[in-house]
Amino acid sequence: MDKLISSVAVRALLAFLLLVALGPILWTVLSAFKDLRDIVTPVPKILFTPTLDNFATILRNPTIRDGLLNSAVVVSAAVLVGAVLGIPAAHTLARYARKWGDDVQFFVLSLRFMPPVAIALPFIVLYLDLGIYDTLFGLVLVYLITTVSTIIWLAVPAFERVPREIEEAAAMEGCGPAEIFWRFSLPVAAPSLFGALVFTFVLVWNELLLALTLAAQKATLPVVAASITSLGKEVPWGVINAATVVLVLPPLVFIGLLMGLLNSMVRSGPK
Amino acid sequence: MTRKRFVTLTLIPAIGLLATLALVSIAGAIWFSVMNRTLRSADYEFVGLHNFLRLLRDRRFFNALENSIIWEAITVIGTLTLAVLLAVLIFETVKKPLWRNLICFAFLVPVLLPRVAAAFIWRFLYSPSLGVINYLCGLVGIGPVEFLANPSLALISVAVVDIWQWGLFFTVILLKLLETLPREPIEAAKLDSARTWEIHAYVTLPMLKGPLISLTLVKAVESLRSFDLIFVMTGGGPGTATETLDLYAYQMGINMGGRISYASAMSVLLLIVTTMAFVIIWKAGKKWTN
């Protein structure tokens, strides 16, 4: 009997934990389909007539549409350039740089931890002087710090896991280092590399401070979302919830990949 | 192509770009911190340590410093405690792989949310008039509680959101690490009829000491970037009750008046603290992997 009670208690606790993890998000999704009338009720409503008005408002609003577009352009450009520069560098660091490779990796990872304010302040002055303040190019440039460093950081272990025999056999066949990288190491490491790119994408997609500081008209989606609250006197909660849902969707698509990345990192981590 | 040329060709563009951008921001921050540059005028001159000395007399700076320290303590301790407790609980009670995976997926969702989105989600939940949390408080006879408008509650209320995102994420990492541990020491402890909590307190968690230290330091550095969450949820208010260092630096340097130099002095201090923390993380990480 005791066992039964404790197993019921454990189940209840786990159900509660799942509710704490997902409840707030589900509630937001639910509220995104609500009329403002159904949101502003003394007792929270579970049953209501769903409406698409909030999403329509968002997609019709030019500021939000532009934000979505700016975010898509800036984030994909920064991740793409980051990948082109970072992935070959990571391969070299993993394979050819024994002695000073550690120092380079230290430097690269330390950038990932720089306080964004310390980047934002000098760059705003520099951008104003250079005339690239409030341009998509400027945002991409500053995001390269994040993307290149994160991609190198995550791609080095991916290349270290490529079996050495493959590369040695290719070298015996007379392949040069570039060919070995392109034809042998890259395809083997590709799945983990994809995970790394996704992780980097999420990081930059979520970024607020730099986008807020270095652009005004060319605002990205987080900046636009952050400014919705001040639309008029009445807080448009339905619209805010719908905007949150739009903001949340792209990162969530990648959750399975993040899980795989985590699994492989834990497995290769403590030896 | 020779190996040496390949190495140069792959490393120089990436590292060169990073070094340039990093140098611009670090040198720029230090340079402006000893000047009197503002966003209003392009003229500026050398003022030495004036900005740093003024910080020492700035009440609002010490308020921000205090808030940052409290924020660090709450979020780091809260995240790690929650993660350890939940990871052990799930490790002991959920044995079916399907359920475990389901829980892991659910726990990864919050950390993937953009901070701005997480901030909105919780502002909505916290809302005194239409939030679910206050509705639940009302059912048990408390409230309405002004989670974000009450100066003594606001910082903790925002920290809860940070712990919600990171604590659940770290739970998944710790659970995966627990699964990789060898079974023998745990079985041996069981034979000695150790209790479940004793096994974890004296056997498994000490085996994970290295990763736990690394996670703590990673969270400590990550917590220094409190900006997004606090900016959207309270904007530093009420008053300056939730204003941390990076928020104050932003307000000073960009939002009001654009006192770049004064804000730079603050960001230089932040930079020094972060660098010191990072060097420790790196050394600890190296020690653990070797």
Image (cartoon, grey):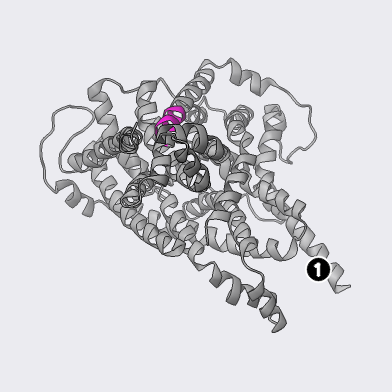
Could you tell me residue B159's position as x and y percent? 51, 52
Tell me which residue sits at (45%, 60%) in the image. Answer: B73
Q: Residues within 10 Å of mark 1 (few under 14, many from 20)?
A: few
Asked whether A51 or B187 is in front, the reply is B187
Q: Is residue B209 left or right of residue B68?
A: right
**Residue to which mark 1 is pinned:** A6
Residue B65 visible to an observer of this rendering: yes
Could you tell me residue A186's position as x and y percent? 51, 35
Tell me which residue sits at (62%, 61%) in the image. Answer: B180
For the record, the magenta segment spans A78-86
Q: Amino acid at mark 1?
A: Ser
Residue A40 visible to an observer of this rendering: no
Say if the magenta span includes residue B53: no
Q: Quadrant of residue B6?
A: top left
Q: Is residue A208 left or right of residue B1?
A: right
Could you tell me residue B82's position as x and y percent? 59, 61
Could you tell me residue A164's position as x and y percent? 49, 47
Tell me which residue sits at (47%, 22%) in the image. Answer: A73
What secondary structure is found at the residue carrying circle 1?
helix
Asked whether A58 or B210 is in front, the reply is B210
Say if the magenta span includes residue A82: yes
Asked whether A135 or A260 is in front, the reply is A260
Chain ID, mark 1: A
In the image, residue A173 above or below residue B167: above
Type of secondary structure dominating the magenta stretch: helix
